[in-house]
Image (tube, helix red, strand yellow):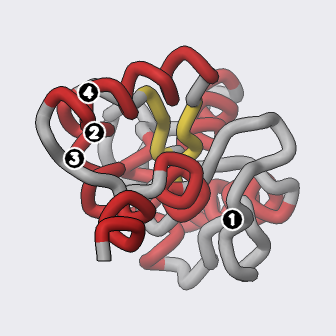
Amino acid sequence: MFAETQALEQRVQELNAAGLMDAQIAATLEAEGYQTPGLVHPITSKIVCHLRHQWQIPTVKLNKNQHNLAQWEDGSYSVEGAAAKLDVGQDTIFNWLKTGRLKGEHLARSMPWKIYMTEDDERRLHEWLRRQGRRTRQSKREAL
């Protein structure tokens, strides 16, 4: 069993070094027939996260531990970028993600969000703010 655990740790290190996220690592390990140490459970992204923590393997970062970009290479936005684009606070962006007004994905814990926003989404959200009688940060500044 010790050899199996060592092999699993080595493979997690290799896949992590290749830049794979926990869910991708879990899928690869499952496809390769690995199982959780001492248990017969499928390997999930949560288990990979736990194992990485236990073995002190750092998580892969989209932004390589640098400040989040406003917009990622694929055209999606960070929370900061979406907030700036829509001229609202980051708490509003998180709320809209939670309620489904905005679409996005959080690839893993302690990873930035990737928010998918079209021009139609931007218009729709600005219109929603207007109907709610809420001002954007810019309109608040203009009112002063």
Does residue 110 show up? yes
Which is nearer the eye, 136 or 24? 136
Quickly name the residue at label 2.
Answer: 96
> Is disc 2 surrounded by few (<14), some (14 to 19) or many (20+) residues within 10 Å?
some
Residue mark closest to the camera, 4 vs 3: 4
The numbered disc on residue 60 is 1
Q: CA distance from mark 2 to mark 4?
A: 11 Å
Q: Earlier along the polypeptide chain: callout 2 or callout 4? A: 2
Residue drawn at 31 percent across, 77 percent down: 144
Q: Give the total of numbered labels.
A: 4
Left or right: 109 with respect to 115? Answer: left
Q: CA distance from mark 2 to mark 3?
A: 4 Å
Query: x, y percentage for residue 82?
Result: 53, 50
- Tell me if residue 48 comes above or below residue 52 in the rendering: above
Q: Quick one: SS at disc 3?
A: helix
- Quarter of the image where one finds residue 23: top right
Query: x, y percentage for residue 143?
Result: 31, 67
- Quarter of the image where one finds residue 59: bottom right
Q: CA distance from mark 4 to mark 3?
A: 14 Å
Left or right: 23 with respect to 142? Answer: right
Q: Are marks 2 and 1 in contact (CB under 8 Å)?
A: no
Which is nearer the eye, 125 or 35? 125
Q: Are marks 4 and 3 in contact (CB under 8 Å)?
A: no
| Residue type pointed to by label 2 | Trp
Q: Earlier along the polypeptide chain: callout 2 or callout 1? A: 1
Q: CA distance from mark 4 to mark 1?
A: 36 Å
The numbered disc on residue 95 is 3
| Residue type pointed to by label 4 | Trp
Q: Are marks 4 and 1 in contact (CB under 8 Å)?
A: no
Residue drawn at 80 percent across, 55 percent down: 19
